[in-house]
């Protein structure tokens, strides 16, 4: 079994599921999953977890993300991006950088955002995009997201290029549409590259073709990142050999024998004396013990 995480640079034109299917073929590992879906037109960082790595996807999903986006002002579509049907057009040639900057101020910080009707969010067990394709528009519920950074990187009318650093759940398509509406001309997403997701950066990513070549040449396992790469914000503790053996058998550990760097966190990473990542432990205050939450050996 292959255990770890691949930092994939997803190409334009394929789905995130396509990437997972390809990684299964290239590696021979059947237990494969990804974190943070990218639309087919988007490219960039897509963490793909293998084997035991699939058990830490939930801890990655809360991580922040960085995007480089191209927004076409003056063109609105039903999908909010370039792949959709044009619903409105307007002249955006007269819009100035100053006007754009003023509008962008409204989208920095914690904002309310309505997810696109063409999205993977589910209504009555079915993704919204399936409802939309059947001609049924389900209005998404407004929710709060956080935009930490939103900076102009270029203005080539009618295309605006921006860098976005944001929280989970942020739709850049919705941001493009809402910005266009605020400017009075409409807007849609022209291009999107995710350059970072949590600890994963596009500078250290690999294309699916590179992964295929590496595994064909026997170098593939060297590209796998350790499972605990996505858990570095969780305090760590070292267990001595007797307690490590007990824990691996499913037994609880006394709090006096497990002392993570930061107290009262509620969860910690457990390592052997030799530095091997063993498990995630959960603190049970009523009993003053650490209980194995997820064991990785």
Image: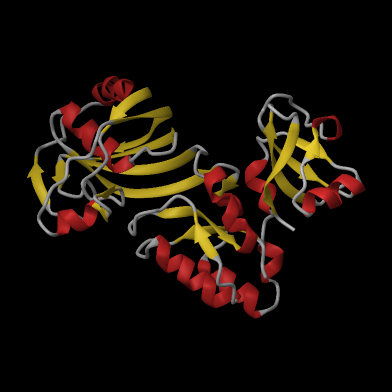
Viewer-nearest residue: 62 or 38: 62
Image quadrant where one finds the N terminus: bottom right
- When asked about the image quadrant of residue 73, the answer is top left
Instruction: Tell me residue 146's x, y (percent).
Output: 41, 28
Asked whether, in this view, residue 83 is left or right of residue 41, the answer is: left
Quarter-wise, where is residue 60 in the image?
Answer: top right
Please name the residue shown 28% across and 19% down the image. Answer: 102
Residue at the image point whose x is 81% and y is 52% from the top: 276
Residue depicted at 9% across the width and 43% down the height:
89
Say whether residue 110 is left or right of residue 234: left
Q: Is residue 237 above or below residue 296?
A: above
What is the x, y in percent for residue 295?
Answer: 70, 52
Could you tell me residue 291's position as x and y percent? 71, 41
Colouring style: secondary structure
Residue 100 in the figure: left or right of residue 184 = right
- Residue 273: tell me if it is visible: no
- Whether 209 is drawn above or below 285: the answer is below
Asked if residue 234 shows in the view, the reply is yes
Comparing 114 with 216, the one in front is 114
> Where's residue 22, x and y in %?
48, 72
Quadrant position of residue 236: top right
């Amino acid at each position: 079994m292959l255990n770890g995480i691949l930092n994939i640079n997803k190409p334009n034109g394929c789905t995130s599921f396509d990437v997972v299917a390809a990684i299964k073929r290239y590696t021979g590992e059947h237990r494969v999953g990804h974190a943070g879906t990218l639309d087919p037109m988007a490219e960039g960082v897509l963490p793909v977890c293998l084997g035991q790595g699939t058990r830490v996807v939930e801890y990655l999903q809360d991580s922040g993300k960085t995007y480089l986006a191209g927004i076409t002002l003056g063109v609105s579509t039903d999908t909010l991006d370039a792949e959709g049907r044009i619903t409105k057009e307007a002249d955006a040639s007269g819009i100035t950088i100053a006007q754009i900057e003023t509008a962008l101020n409204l989208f920095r910080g914690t904002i309310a955002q309505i997810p696109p009707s063409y999205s993977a969010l589910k209504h009555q067990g079915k993704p919204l995009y399936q409802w939309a394709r059947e001609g049924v528009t389900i209005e998404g519920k407004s929710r709060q997201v956080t935009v930490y950074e939103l900076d102009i990187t270029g203005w080539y009318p009618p295309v605006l290029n921006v860098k976005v650093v944001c929280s989970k759940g942020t739709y850049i398509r919705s941001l493009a549409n809402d910005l266009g509406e605020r400017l009075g001309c409409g807007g849609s997403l022209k291009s999107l590259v995710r350059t970072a997701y949590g600890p994963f950066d596009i500078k250290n990513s690999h294309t699916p073709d590179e992964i295929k070549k590496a595994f064909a040449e026997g170098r593939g396992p060297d590209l796998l990142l350790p499972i605990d790469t996505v858990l570095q914000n969780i305090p760590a503790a070292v267990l001595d050999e007797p307690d490590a053996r007990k824990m691996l058998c499913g037994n609880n550990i006394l709090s006096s024998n497990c002392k993570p760097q930061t107290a009262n966190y509620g969860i910690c990473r457990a390592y052997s004396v030799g530095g091997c990542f063993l498990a995630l432990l959960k603190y049970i205050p009523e009993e003053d013990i650490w209980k194995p939450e997820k064991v990785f050996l």
